[in-house]
Amino acid sequence: MLPLRFFRASRRIVPAARSLSSDVPSLDLSVDSEGIATLTMQRLPVNSLNLEVLQEFDKALDEVEKIKAKGLIITSASSTVFSAGLDIREMYKPETERMATFASTLQNLWLKLYGSPYPTAAAITGHAPAGGCLIAMSCEYRAMVNGNFRIGLNETALGIVASSFFIDTMRSVISRRETELALTTGRMFFVDEALKVGLIDETTTDKADAIEKCKNFIKRFDKIPPLARGLTKQRKRIYEMEHLQNNSAAERNESIHFITQPEVQHSVGTYLEKLKQKAAK
């Protein structure tokens, strides 16, 4: 069974517009006059998610529930990148204890976001590979800015295996067949391709348009009793959540064992070197 906190629906309030994160450099959390919270990733240039950012993200989700927000929009301060995903440097020659904390923090964050009782939406402003795609898929609605951007789980292309809850999340959004093909080939979908397979719900002209569409999605539940809505969402998502909860320790250990294999470390090191050379140009 899921912990009781997953089944506590948000009581709707309308706080004044304010910033909630003046002391959080990598994220900005604000809530507007209608009670809709916006979490902006601002660890530029690519919003990579290291341990500290994941911990901040986790605390931000606690704050969203604490203030009884009507809903949550996740977006980026970048006009070209939503999030590049997990910080690859966390996976290169990792210290075992930190890697375990990194993995458990990511799991807990996903459980909170995927199982949140309030409506969630992603305003995707640019590229969203790997962990960036996971964050977007964990939301109930995705609006992506048109452009030469791509989204997907590309772990296999980097010599990494996606965790089971990454796979379960994609399978809950697009078809099983599309999920298998996408995962095994490390496919990154262009915006129109993502719309066609259902990986995103709408395309937008710019960030402001994406934010507006996300707000409209959240507002469609204004006349729906929040307790019934939240429980229905969580019951629909319970399989994926219980699967991770029942296997969290095994998944962490498996991930650490895999990522520390010499051939995987070689692949990660090669990728980091390419990034370093690209940045130096």
Image (cartoon, rainbow, N blue to C red):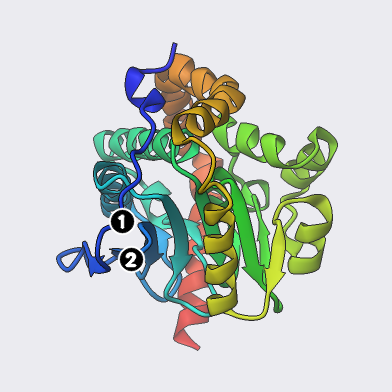
Mark drawn on residue 33: 2
Distance in Å between CA atoms under marks 1 and 2: 6 Å
Residue at image location 64% in from the left, 50% down from the top: 153
Tell me where residue 37 appears, x and y as whole percent. 37, 58
- Which residue, as the protein is rendered here, is positioned at the far bottom? 281
Residue 203 place in picture, x, y as percent: 71, 69
Which residue is pictured at 36% across the width and 34% down the height? Answer: 108
**In the image, what residue occupies the spot 42% across and 17% down?**
2
> What residue does disc 1 label?
14
Task: Say left or right for 139 vs 103.
Answer: right
- Residue with the most extreme front position: 223
**Count of numbered circles on the image:** 2
Between residues 191 and 62, which one lies in front from this camera angle? 62
Farthest residue, direction left: 23
Relative to 159, does residue 34 appear above or below in the rendering? below
Which residue is pictured at 21% across the width and 62% down the height? 20
Q: Quadrant of residue 111?
A: top left
Badge 1 element: loop
Instruction: Give residue 95's position: percent from left, percent from top.
Output: 28, 41
Position of 9 with respect to 259 (left or right) is left
Categorize mark 1 by other alpha carbons within 10 Å: few (<14), some (14-19), many (20+): some
Residue sitting nearer the eye, 104 or 56: 56
**Residues at badges 1 and 2 in contact (C-beta under 8 Å)?**
yes
The amino acid pointed to by label 2 is Ser
Circle 2 SS class: loop
* Side of 46 relative to 232 (left or right): left
In front of the other: 173 or 131: 173
Which labelled disc corresponds to residue 130? none
Q: Position of residue 272 (x, y in %)?
A: 48, 63
